[in-house]
Image (cartoon, coloured by chain):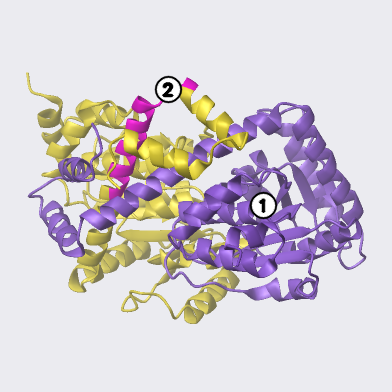
Chain colours: A purple, B yellow
């Protein structure tokens, strides 16, 4: 009997599904498996798809996968479900549309709830992508809902980031200004059959012409119009993704991004270990006693933090 | 000659201004000063004001401060400037409107750039609020732009959170669904002179009636309409804030929130210390060598992270 890593590498979907479950549940052996899988990953092109709720991302991803399948690509999809940082509840919503792809043995789709910490989501997304990559899926699409900090973190895993904007969503363009612009590699104006689509394209073009402080200036961000209703624009979009992939490799951008990504992964892994050490070193009762003392002004948070650091072994 | 802490506690504005600068620049002595200041803080009511760009937050805060001054309160304001996680650039924008308050010796306003890490912003905001609190300012208003994860983090410092929505901002209500709802204590519909204001109130009321999974169910979130143009609603808003403050103290909510806040502050302080240890232990050159080995698949990130943990002393 082969182990789960060998089975995954040989293309066994059930082994991959089980690995993803191990990653999501943070089961102890997953770390060891992932260390092995890392040797076999690094081949897939990772495409991020983000945008506000209702922008039409799930439909777009479904069409993209279908188009990629025409060229016989084995496609992986990681769909991050929206959830609040407090309730932890996930709304599954229009993921159902993606179900039409579920019967295809060369498409692997996994939904992940975005409960837990911000860093936790980014790191488990990275690990799931690593497992799919080692299993031979290429490209891998990561879809997130919303354009907040959590999405920006997740999108750092991707090599090509698509920001999807639906016509007439008003405040969307405002939201883009706030930070998404700098992670976008391609803009997609969805629902291009709507009469206001051209205005949205014009607004985005204006926005791009104003954004002069972008680091990787050599890439000119394209704006691609797509219509799922009229089945338009998907081929152009896939071409734009390929062009961006080529650009990454021809320029030094690919290496630069890979450097940044690995560094942030190392930091995240270490911070996670610190959280685990704290959990092990400080009981719930002691937390309560310490916190009460701070709230009653008998102690201060800075001194207590120093003491806890010493307890988990951290050098000064 | 008195030291900076004594001068700050005796009400010296220049000492407070200097302390805030020390906090922002993460100057080493600030930690020691803050430990002292903590003993004298804990009296101020902390009011968070958040909402999408263009919702009219700065104007609202200006009116709120003026109304609070009528009752002779000494008011502190911390305004967080928007900036991208990448460029670090800050847009100062309509902060200028707040300038009319700048001449009042009983109002202390400080703008902070939101460059740096998410956690960094939340912790320096908390420290600046602590300094203002110890200096006798009460209430203290924290204003943030946007409704993303960074704002949610910052808003955890506040005891009463106002979410400002302008009429006809369309996608705003969508964004609120995504997470802000659960941190809101009071909704403010600004620009209430606009004809579509009542529709926005109705949409928010609908949203609130649907949100059944809110933890602190005893507080019924009010929706307050304000108009800076017609100078309406500010008194009602200040009353609503006072009612919420009373509610926090009468229920157990105040103690519960204080517990959570101190815990998250302790964790943030410890994680920050870990980042400092890593910076001291690993040179830029070594980072590059390690990262290259990982990208070339000679090493894996999990093993490298374990080694670095051991290096900074972290126990298994």
Q: In the figure, A129 relative to B36: above or below?
A: below
Chain where mark 1 sits:
A
Q: Mark 1 to mark 2: distance in Å? A: 31 Å
Is A67 covered by the magenta stretch? no
Residue B282 part of the magenta-drawn span: yes
Q: Is residue A213 visible?
A: yes
Give B112 or A132, whichever is nearer the viewer: A132
* Image location (x, y in percent) of residue B240: 33, 67
Residue B84 is at least partly visible in this image: no
Mark 2 neighbour density, 10 Å: few (under 14) some (14–19) many (20 or more): few
Residue that carries the numbered disc 2 in the rendered image: B283
Of residues A152 and A225, the one nearer the viewer is A152
What residue is rendered at 81% in x and 45% in y?
A241
Please state the extent of the stretch shown in magenta in the rendering: B267-285
Q: Is residue B183 shown left or right of residue A75? A: left
Q: Are marks 1 and 2 on the same chain?
A: no
Relative to B246, A34 lies left or right: right
Residue marked by disc 1 = A134
Q: Provide the chain ID for the residue under circle 2.
A: B
Residue A125 position within the rendered picture, expressed as x and y whole percent measured from the top left: 57, 55
């Amino acid at each position: 009997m082969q182990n789960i890593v060998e089975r995954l590498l040989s293309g066994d979907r059930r082994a991959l599904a089980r690995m993803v479950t191990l990653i999501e549940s943070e089961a102890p052996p997953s770390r060891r498996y992932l260390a092995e899988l890392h040797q076999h990953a690094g081949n897939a092109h990772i495409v991020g798809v983000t945008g506000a709720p209702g922008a039409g991302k799930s439909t777009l991803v479904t069409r993209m996968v279908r188009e990629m399948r025409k060229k016989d690509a084995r496609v992986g999809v990681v769909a991050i479900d929206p959830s609040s940082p407090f309730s932890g509840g996930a709304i599954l919503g229009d993921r159902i549309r993606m179900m039409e792809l579920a019967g295809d043995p060369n498409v692997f789709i996994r939904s992940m709830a975005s409960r837990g910490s911000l860093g936790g989501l980014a790191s488990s997304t990275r690990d799931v992508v690593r497992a799919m990559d080692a299993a031979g899926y290429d490209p891998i699409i990561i879809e997130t809902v919303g354009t907040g900090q959590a999405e920006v973190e997740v999108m750092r895993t991707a090599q090509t980031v698509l920001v999807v904007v639906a016509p007439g969503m008003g405040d969307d363009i405002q939201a883009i200004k706030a930070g998404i612009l700098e992670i976008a590699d391609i803009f997609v104006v969805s629902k291009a059959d709507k009469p206001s689509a051209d205005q949205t394209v014009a607004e985005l073009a204006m926005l791009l012409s104003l954004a002069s402080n972008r680091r990787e200036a050599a890439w000119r961000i394209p704006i691609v119009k797509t219509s799922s209703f009229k089945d338009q624009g998907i081929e152009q979009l896939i071409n734009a993704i390929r062009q961006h992939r080529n650009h990454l490799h021809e320029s030094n951008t690919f290496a630069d991004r890979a450097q940044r990504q690995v560094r942030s992964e190392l930091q995240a892994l270490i911070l996670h270990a610190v959280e685990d050490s704290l959990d092990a070193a400080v009981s719930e009762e002691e937390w309560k006693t310490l916190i009460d003392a701070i709230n009653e002004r008998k102690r201060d948070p800075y001194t207590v933090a120093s003491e806890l650091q010493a307890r988990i072994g951290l050098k000064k």
